[in-house]
């Protein structure tokens, strides 16, 4: 008689906790990075201006949930860019290349897109 000894494990979430936004476009841009937690009231938006050719680091955000003493991580859900001409481009979760929790993930802004870039492959 044989027994099946396989176990099923939980996958780590494909989440981004902090990021670096690089502005490779031709002009200054306004960037909003939308974070989410477990519940709606955990939502938070980082709103920054980034000059042409510059980059900004968006630190991770944490929150308390329930009676736990531990901190929970908010995750990046959306990156929205408003360009000088008033048009917007955005990139939503799931982000290309993210298969587990990540810190300092790179988002590169060009004139017409936002690219999800694995910093380990840069």
Image (cartoon, helix red, strand yellow):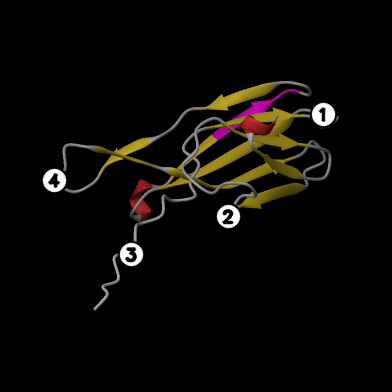
SS category of the residue bearing label 1: loop
> Which label lies toward us, 3 or 4?
3
Disc on the earlier residue, 4 or 2? 4
Q: List x then y, in percent, for residue 4.
A: 30, 71
Q: Which mark is residue 48?
A: none
Q: Nearer the viewer, residue 106 or 42?
A: 106
Q: Would you place residue 5 above or below residue 1 in this image?
A: above
| Gap in angstroms between the C-alphas marked 1 and 2 | 27 Å
Disc on the earlier residue, 3 or 1? 3
Q: Where is residue 64, by image quadrant?
A: top left
The residue to which callout 3 is attached is: 6
| Gap in angstroms between the C-alphas marked 3 and 4 | 34 Å
Disc on the earlier residue, 2 or 3? 3
Magenta span includes 40: no
Q: Would you place residue 52 above or below residue 117 in this image?
A: above
Quarter of the rendering occupied by the C terminus: top right
The residue to which callout 1 is attached is: 27
Q: Which mark is residue 67?
A: 4
> Could you tell me which residue is drawn at 72 percent across and 35 percent down?
108
User: Magenta stretch?
Assistant: 47-51
Residue 1 vs residue 16: left or right? left
Disc on the earlier residue, 1 or 2? 1
| Gap in angstroms between the C-alphas marked 3 and 1 | 54 Å
Pick out the residue farthest to the bottom.
Answer: 1
Q: Residues within 10 Å of mark 2 (few under 14, many from 20)?
A: some
SS category of the residue bearing label 4: loop
> Which label lies toward us, 3 or 1?
3
> Which label lies toward us, 1 or 2?
2
Q: Would you place residue 77 above or below residue 119 in this image?
A: below
Q: Are marks 3 and 4 in contact (CB under 8 Å)?
A: no
Q: Number of callouts in the render?
A: 4
């Amino acid at each position: 008689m044989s027994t099946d000894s396989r176990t099923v494990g939980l996958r780590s979430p494909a989440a981004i906790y902090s990021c670096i936004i690089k502005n490779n476009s031709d002009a200054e841009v306004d960037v909003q990075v939308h974070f989410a937690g477990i519940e709606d009231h955990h939502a938070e938006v980082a709103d920054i201006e980034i000059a042409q050719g510059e980059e900004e680091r968006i630190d991770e955000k944490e929150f308390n949930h329930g009676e736990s003493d531990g901190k929970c991580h908010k995750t990046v859900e959306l990156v929205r860019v408003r360009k000088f001409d008033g048009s917007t481009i955005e990139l939503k979760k799931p982000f290309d290349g993210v298969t587990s929790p990540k810190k300092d993930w790179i988002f590169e802004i060009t004139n017409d897109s936002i690219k999800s870039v694995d910093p380990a492959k840069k």
